[in-house]
Amino acid sequence: MQVLRDEGLSWAENFSYASQLLRACYKGMHLVGDLMDIVSPEKRSQMMAGIKGKNTKPEMIVRKLVHGMGFRFRLHRKTLPGSPDLVFPRLRRVIFVHGCFWHRHPGCRLAYTPKSNAPFWLEKLEGNVRRDSFALKALDALGWEVLIVWECEVSNLPALAQKLNCFLAAG
Ligand SMILES: [Zn+2]
């Protein structure tokens, strides 16, 4: 299999490459565990740093859809808990676009634990889930409504558009 191509890739590119591998898992190929064994520890930790990868593809698709519906938003508000990906200040609503693997989408086939180095992954991934849950509670306490869009939902654009519209257009 192909490994990460060179050290000069941006994090968005690496994240996108990891996403391609994850998509390959749909076809029954468990490549990510292999990938993690192949890459250097340094590269591995860089990939981990890509958890909150900015401008990743699913996020761009969500932005485009929402923009096309006529809603205007701000990006990655660091002043809000969890630094939501899209923020609608006037509506007091926020949207997170989550990678299924990194944020452990419940019941999703992309949200598995790599067999190799499982304790490391469990700790890492469950730490993400804890942080997400903390951010949701904090946002709720501040009066923000939250929508989570999962990476795998981007494969069904009509359903995704409907979900976004329901969330944003609701009174
Ligand atoms: Zn998913």
Image (cartoon, rainbow, N blue to C red):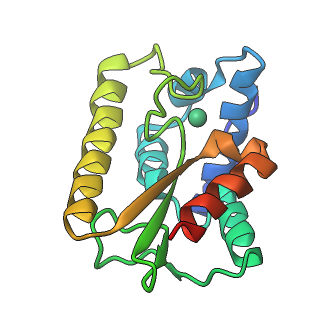
Count of numbered marks: 0
Query: Residue lying furthest front in this view?
Result: 171
Can you give x and y, in whole percent of width and height, for residue 44 in the image? Answer: 46, 41
Residue 6 appears in view: no
Instruction: Reply above or below: 45 against 3.
Output: below
Can you give x and y, in whole percent of width and height, for residue 57 in the image? Answer: 69, 58
Instruction: Reply above or below: 117 against 10.
Output: above
From the viewer's side, name the closer residue of 37 and 65: 65
From the viewer's side, name the closer residue of 19 and 140: 140
Instruction: Reply above or below: 24 against 143.
Output: above
Q: Quadrant of the N terminus?
A: top right
Can you give x and y, in whole percent of width and height, for residue 136 in the image? Answer: 30, 54
Taking the spot 77% from the left edge, 76% from the top edge, the residue there is 68
Ligand 1 - quadrant of the structure image: top right
Residue 82, by quadrant, is: bottom left
From the viewer's side, name the closer residue of 128 and 68: 68
Taking the spot 36% from the left edge, 28% from the top edge, the residue there is 121
